[in-house]
């Protein structure tokens, strides 16, 4: 019994080790030290980027800093022998998935290579940053990549037009992309490669294509040497609130590829998104994929194939693809096959209880553990070392699984547990397939191997065991890879989701270890797994919450209500308590114009802060519908937002030539934004389907704080910085329009 206990302990440790190594299954290729003339040179690309972003100040659209970045970008293109043009326009774009319109002056930098006639390939990126950070990755990595790809393609002149678009205003709502769609050049395009970033390291994911996707996926598979892409990610992305320039381009029906790294989101949209944090290997992976795709589209012929494909890469080495209809049919066939075999073998109820109980119970246990730790350590206590929290959730899954096998499943044969595990696995795949059909690809091959072994065992008894072992290996190298990517993508939580996801691999291994579990008492098996889980959670709870590399979000704001004259300090963070040195009296709450929870405390009035002004110039009525023309006065603010209640029925907003519709089927408040220097005196048009005036909040913000903020700035925690929002002063007022 003692030997069996030791062996089981080693199995559990090996399983946790395998889960810890899962993120290593998807890595950017090692940086090349020597580049052939036909290869992408990441070192040269990063050197160009260093020159372009200069002193690494934030450079939001229509700012002095962005003017300087644009000047250096234009100078670099000319030095490369490429003559760009700058399109200067004031544009507006509707915000995707929310009720809003955003406006700004944008100056797109456009360069054309190759012949002037024929259908063109568009390579697109943006050169503006958010006000909170320098944007070395978002989207400096795209700027650096496009420049180096252009340098490489000059060695082999394109056979059709190649358009390089460095757009401005992406961070404000894809405004530059909307402006480009009014350019006659946009009418000649049939393919686009868009470059983005949500992190600073790791492999570059091809996370979105045009639909149907058969042609782009075939092109990607043939062209890219180290593919990182899967159809589950592309489907999940469509369900998220995120968007890129591709959302604006989608109306044209271009063949589309969207690429981005996602490693270490804690630096994204923050001062941490600097040159030092941008991994050259990630830049090289971005460049290699972009160059390969560009060459395939410039010198080859896109496959003339239709329909949708499901696909996944295997450790970044190859791309496995299937027609969606074949994948769905195979999944249904496997479900029927395992259903029939499981019914014949018996003990179906007990076996499924083990599988379902592990899946549901592991999530519940992880959620409970996270909640208990959260009582003691509020905020994202896992941010610095997320691996420990991930391992703790996986250890929770093992504890639940081993307990159920040792109790409910003790009298059940190993074969019956195995069969019903795969049946449940396939049911999960079918449910995921209803919402994200691309996920089906991850639920086909391992159970197919297992079923083949079961059927072959009639003639060769070891076949089932051999097939089960092979299925475990295949499941790890496919499911483990997507888990590693999800760990990066969901690093802000919910962390408990990894327990049930991990159980889809871990329970299978535990079932194969059932002979060991059966030789050990229930008390010993649960104690062994329990100690492992408690140790993992203890390490996760004790690990530092933040570090130099992975810092806490901590935004300091000075907020003033112009009507009452009252001011507050507002701190946006992850909910963790504020340092004691910042004083007492802080309370959690929301602002009238934001549903984000934050800390509040009274603040001295800033006499220099004024709310923006909005004045109606004229109004046109048509029944219950009113079209207003209004003039903006920022009063020293960089950004102006007009926020209306959810029942305002605003049909459209914008400036002449760029009046954009607002989808009435979306939920939430309405927001019309104007950002940058050029908003001063700008004329906007709003169409409101309400005869009576609408009460708007007019919110102005600027990325600076009054002198009275000095004590707060001095006490900001060591490992904390602004993210998504800069430290800023906000003033708001109310106006009826």
Image (cartoon, rainbow, N blue to C red):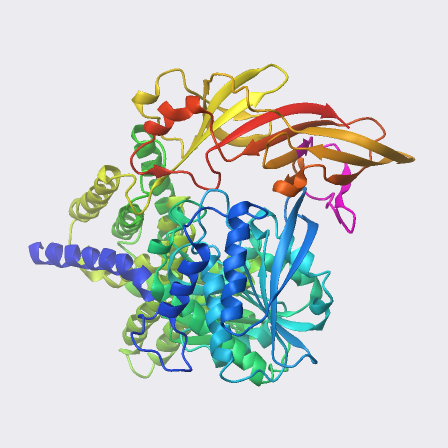
Quadrant (top left/top right/bottom left/bottom right) for the N terminus: bottom left
Image position, residue 15 (x, y; %): 24, 58
The image shows residue 72 at horizontal and vertical percentages of 50, 59
Residue drawn at point x = 46 percent, y = 42 percent:
132
Q: Count the marks.
A: 0
* Residue 680 screen position, x and y as percent: 68, 37
> Quadrant of residue 415 in the image?
bottom left
In the rendered image, which quarter is residue 215 located in?
Answer: bottom right
Can residue 436 be seen here? The reply is yes
For residue 549, above or below residue 708? below
Task: Tell whether 169 sits left or right of 425.
Answer: right
Image quadrant occupied by the C terminus: top right
- Residue sitting at x 67%, y 33%: 642
- Left or right, 52 with respect to 622, comes to left
Q: Residue furthest left?
A: 2
Q: Is residue 81 left or right of residue 422?
A: right
Magenta part of the chain: 642-666
Residue 620 left/right relative to 574:
right
Picture layout, residue 651 above or below residue 457: above
Residue at image location 31% in from the left, 57% down from the top: 507
Whether the magenta-drawn stretch holds residue 583 is answered as no
Residue 633 x/y as whole percent? 69, 32
User: Closest to the observer: 165 or 663?
Assistant: 165
Q: Is residue 430 visible?
A: no
Q: Quadrant of residue 721?
A: top left
The answer to which of 360 and 576 lies nearer the viewer is 576
């Amino acid at each position: 019994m003692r030997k069996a206990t030791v062996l089981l302990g080693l199995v559990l440790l090996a399983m946790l080790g395998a889960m810890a190594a899962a993120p290593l299954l998807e890595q950017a290729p090692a940086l090349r030290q020597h580049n052939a003339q036909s290869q992408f040179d990441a070192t040269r690309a990063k050197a160009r980027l260093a020159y372009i972003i200069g002193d690494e100040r934030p450079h939001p659209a229509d700012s002095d800093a962005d003017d300087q970045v644009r000047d250096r970008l234009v100078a670099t293109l000319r030095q490369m022998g490429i003559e760009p043009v700058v399109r200067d326009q004031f544009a507006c774009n509707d915000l995707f998935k929310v009720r809003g319109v955003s406006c700004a002056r944008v100056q797109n930098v456009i360069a054309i290579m190759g012949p002037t006639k024929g259908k063109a390939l568009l390579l697109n990126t943006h050169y503006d940053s958010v006000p909170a950070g320098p944007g070395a990755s978002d989207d400096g990595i795209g700027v650096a990549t496009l420049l180096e790809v252009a340098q490489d393609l000059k060695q082999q002149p394109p056979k059709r037009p190649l358009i390089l678009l460095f757009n401005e205003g992406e961070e404000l709502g894809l405004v530059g992309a909307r402006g480009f769609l009014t350019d006659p050049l946009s009418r000649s395009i049939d393919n686009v490669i868009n470059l983005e970033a949500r992190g600073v390291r790791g492999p570059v994911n091809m996370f979105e294509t045009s639909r149907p996707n058969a042609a782009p996926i075939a092109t990607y598979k043939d062209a890219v040497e180290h593919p990182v892409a899967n159809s589950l990610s592309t489907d999940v992305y469509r369900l998220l609130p995120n968007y890129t320039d591709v959302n604006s381009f989608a109306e044209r029906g271009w063949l589309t590829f969207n690429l981005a790294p996602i490693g270490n989101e804690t630096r994204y949209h923050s001062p941490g998104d600097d040159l030092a944090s941008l991994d050259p290997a990630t830049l090289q992976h971005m460049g290699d994929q972009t160059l390969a795709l560009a060459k395939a589209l410039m010198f080859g012929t896109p496959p003339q194939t239709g329909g949708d494909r499901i696909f996944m890469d295997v450790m970044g080495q190859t791309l496995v693809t299937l027609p969606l209809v074949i994948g769905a049919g195979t999944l249904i066939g496997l479900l029927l096959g395992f259903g029939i075999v499981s019914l014949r073998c018996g003990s179906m109820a007990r076996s499924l209880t083990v599988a379902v109980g592990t899946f549901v119970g592991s999530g519940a246990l992880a959620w409970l553990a996270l909640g208990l730790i959260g009582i003691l350590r509020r905020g994202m206590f896992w941010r610095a070392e997320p691996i420990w929290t991930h391992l703790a959730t996986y250890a929770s899954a093992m504890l639940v699984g081993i307990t159920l096998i040792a109790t409910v499943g003790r009298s059940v044969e190993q074969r019956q547990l195995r069969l019903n595990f795969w049946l449940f696995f396939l049911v999960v795949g079918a449910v995921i397939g209803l919402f994200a059909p691309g996920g089906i690809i991850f639920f086909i091959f391992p159970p197919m191997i297992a079923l083949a072994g079961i059927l072959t065992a009639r003639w060769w008894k070891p076949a089932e065991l051999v097939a089960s072992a092979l299925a475990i290996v295949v499941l790890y190298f496919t499911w483990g890879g997507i888990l590693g990517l999800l760990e990066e993508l969901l690093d802000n939580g919910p962390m408990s989701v990894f327990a049930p996801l991990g159980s889809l691999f871990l329970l299978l291994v535990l079932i194969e270890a059932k002979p060991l579990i059966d030789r050990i008492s229930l008390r010993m098996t649960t104690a062994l797994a329990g100690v492992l889980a408690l140790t993992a959670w203890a390490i996760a709870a004790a690990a530092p919450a933040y570090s130099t590399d992975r810092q806490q979000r901590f935004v300091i704001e000075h907020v003033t209500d112009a009507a009452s004259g009252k001011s507050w300090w507002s701190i946006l963070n992850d909910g963790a308590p504020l340092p004691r040195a910042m004083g007492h009296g802080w309370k959690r709450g929301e602002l009238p114009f934001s549903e984000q929870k934050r800390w509040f405390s009274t603040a001295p009035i800033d006499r220099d802060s004024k709310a923006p002004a909005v004045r109606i110039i004229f109004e046109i009525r048509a029944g219950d519908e009113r079209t207003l023309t209004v003039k903006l006065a920022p009063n020293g603010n960089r950004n102006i937002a007009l926020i209306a209640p959810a029942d305002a029925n605003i049909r459209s907003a914008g400036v002449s030539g760029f009046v954009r519709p607002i989808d009435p089927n979306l939920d939430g408040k309405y927001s019309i934004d104007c950002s940058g220097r050029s908003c001063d005196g700008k004329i906007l048009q709003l169409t409101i389907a309400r005869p009576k005036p609408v009460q708007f909040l007019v919110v102005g913000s600027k990325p600076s704080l009054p002198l009275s903020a000095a004590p707060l700035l001095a006490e900001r925690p060591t490992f904390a910085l602004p993210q998504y929002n800069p430290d800023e002063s906000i003033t708001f007022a109310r106006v009826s329009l």
